[in-house]
Amino acid sequence: MGKLVVMDHPLIQHKISLIRDKSTGTKDFRELVEEIAMLMAYEVTRDLPLKEVEIETPIAKAKTRVISGKTIGIVPILRAGLGMVNGILSLVPAAKVGHIGLYRDPETLQPVEYYCKLPADAAERDLIILDPMLATGGSACDAITLLKKHGVTSIKLVCLIAAPEGISAVQNTHPDVDIYVAAVDECLNDHGYIVPGLGDAGDRLFGTK
Ligand code: PRP
Ligand code: URA
């Protein structure tokens, strides 16, 4: 079973409270989502492999460590995952960015794929899927399946708010994938929205409602 990491750092919890608040407008919502993603990136990248190198400081030669091995790719699920991209890139500026377009059919709640463009070397990279909301888990499970079909073997899922149902769905369907979230909420409502959640992440991010 992949690990479930709930990131309870005070700065993250504070900012999650702000994005939950329905009076938080689009500009602040967008900035906060980016900031939370940046704070989460610190933990998500904790196990990156290092290698020793020798450099020269102005004073002396030094044996020191840099990141080695496979490099990172980030894959936002459109639309709402886009809001997390710059936060991760601010810590991992060399990451390549793929995109997966999925929307949830409002009747069936099933994800419908409409776009997929990945880095050419995606299969050699550690890929991090970004989506603020893990509700039924359908979108995340389909995105992971799609990456696996492209030969990707190292996948992490990073979400801001998750429902227990979504976490179970990913753990059952893709037990090899580690999940990082900032909050685990109570449940889903009849429309598949997370309770208490934050509403529709895409609409709040892009001001479409
Ligand atoms: C939202 C969210 C996730 C999905 C989560 O996207 O950003 O992708 O729903 O729900 P699930 O876990 O039940 O699949 P939505 O389909 O609303 O598309 P949007 O980002 O374009 O608004
Ligand atoms: N998608 C959202 O944007 N919000 C939810 O609560 C569930 C799915």
Image (tube, grey):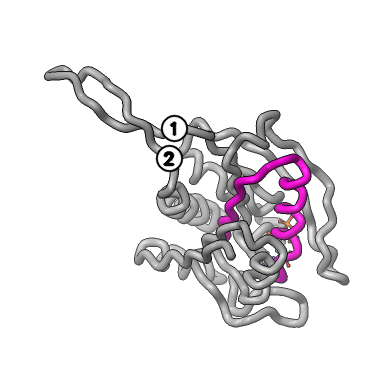
At horizontal 59% and vertical 78% (from top left) the residue drawn is 196
For disc 2, the marked residue is 49
At horizontal 61% and vertical 57% (from top left) the residue drawn is 177
Q: Amino acid at mark 2?
A: Pro
- Give yes or no for residue 150 being in the magenta stretch: yes
Reply above or below: 154 against 3. Answer: above
Q: Residues within 10 Å of mark 2 (few under 14, many from 20)?
A: few
Q: Residue 150: x and y, percent?
A: 75, 40
Q: Secondary structure at mark 2?
A: loop
Tell me where residue 160 sits by quadrant: bottom right
Q: Which residues are magenta?
A: 136-159
The reply to whether the C-beta atoms of the residues labelled 1 and 2 are less than 8 Å apart is yes
At horizontal 57% and vertical 60% (from top left) the residue drawn is 159
Q: Residues within 10 Å of mark 1 (few under 14, many from 20)?
A: few
Say whether residue 115 is left or right of residue 158: right
Q: Amino acid at mark 1?
A: Ser
Say whether residue 79 is left or right of residue 64: right
At horizontal 56% and vertical 56% (from top left) the residue drawn is 158
Q: Quadrant of ligand 1?
A: bottom right
For disc 1, the marked residue is 68
Say whether residue 143 is left or right of residue 163: right
Residue 4 in view, yes or no: yes
- Give yes or no for residue 21 being in the magenta stretch: no
